[in-house]
Amino acid sequence: MRRVVFNQKGGVGKSSITCNLAAISAARGKRTLVVDLDPQGNSTHYLLDKPSSELKDTVADMLEQTVSFSVFNRRPDEFVHASPFHNLFVMPSSPELDFLERKLEAKHKIYKLREALKKLGETFDAIYIDTAPAMNFYTRSALIAAQRCLIPFDCDDFSRQALYNILNEIRDLQEDHNDELVVEGIVANQFQPRASLPKRLVSELLDEGLPVLPVRLSSSVKMKESHQSRQPLIHMAPKHALTQQFENLFKVLHGEQVELEPLAD
């Protein structure tokens, strides 16, 4: 399964959600790949414990060879790095993505990522794609390459307005480029169950028929500690409440039964 985590708004937890779901997938025995398409490289740094600027053989290198004539292009798996965590691999980001974007657009290479990920799907059980907070060439490539899309939502009114724009953009891409893509759900992130605004916003989205997933990811300093230690929560704090929420989210996405805690009144 190829799954993209996308929102045009920054700071909504795309990288945290991508990496922690992927880490759970790997811990469950699935050979799992994270593809980091954000030039900031947060997922790369989180899982490989190195800034993307220090790495060679990145996703930018893989894409660049599609616009450079060569008889011997390298295979997509040659740009995959093993993480310190069993079964978890990363195709790292690069600052070069910013400089490469215009060249890829000019050469109409929007489908090249899909070709590469389909090939990688022969050896990986699950592929998670992290994206930049923008509707640019790379996020469109990711949405064209993916089968499922998760949309993080951080429960404020600005995010709600942006959500409608995102859903419209995805609908256009589904119609024109990828009828296989399904919006798997909206993930309420940094949710505060005792605050009235987040509950009201989520309730209103559900009343509108939007696919808000039943698991809420709470706001916790443990997430920041996880970033600092470069360890996904399932490895750093397996018993923590937020870790359990991520595990419940994973179960929901895979059709497993979940007992959800009631939200505070």
Image (tube, rainbow, N blue to C red):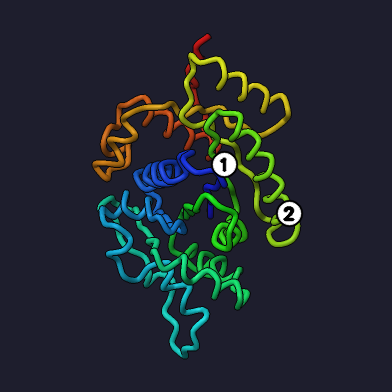
Q: Nearer the viewer, residue 88 or 189?
A: 189
Q: Where is residue 146 in the image (x, y as percent from the top left)?
A: 58, 56
- The residue drawn where x is 48% and y is 54% is 129
Q: Which of 185 and 159 is in front in this view?
A: 159
Q: Position of residue 130 (x, y in %)?
A: 47, 52
Compared to residue 178, the image places residue 233 above or below, namely: above
Quarter residue 196 falls in: top right
Compared to residue 113, the image places residue 193 above or below, namely: above
> Label 1 neighbourhood size at 10 Å, few (<14), some (14-19), many (20+)?
many
Residue that lies at the very extreme toward the bottom in this rendered image: 71
Q: Which amino acid type is shown beneath numbered disc 2?
A: Asp
- The residue drawn where x is 34% and y is 34% is 223
- The residue drawn where x is 32% and y is 37% is 234
Q: Position of residue 79 (x, y in %)?
A: 38, 69
Compared to residue 241, the image places residue 170 above or below, namely: below
Pointer 1: what residue? Answer: 151
Compared to residue 78, the image places residue 69 above or below, namely: below
Q: Which amino acid type is shown beneath numbered disc 1?
A: Ile
Q: Which of 47 and 256 is in front in this view?
A: 47
Instruction: Left or right? Give the position of 237 relative to 194.
Output: left
Quarter residue 235 falls in: top left
As measured in the structure, the alpha-carbon distance from the residue carrying label 1 to the one carrying label 2 is 16 Å
Quarter residue 16 falls in: top left
Instruction: Left or right? Give the position of 124 relative to 203.
Output: left
Pointer 2: what residue? Answer: 172
Residue that lies at the very extreme toward the top in this rendered image: 265
Q: Earlier in the sequence, mark 1 or mark 2?
A: 1
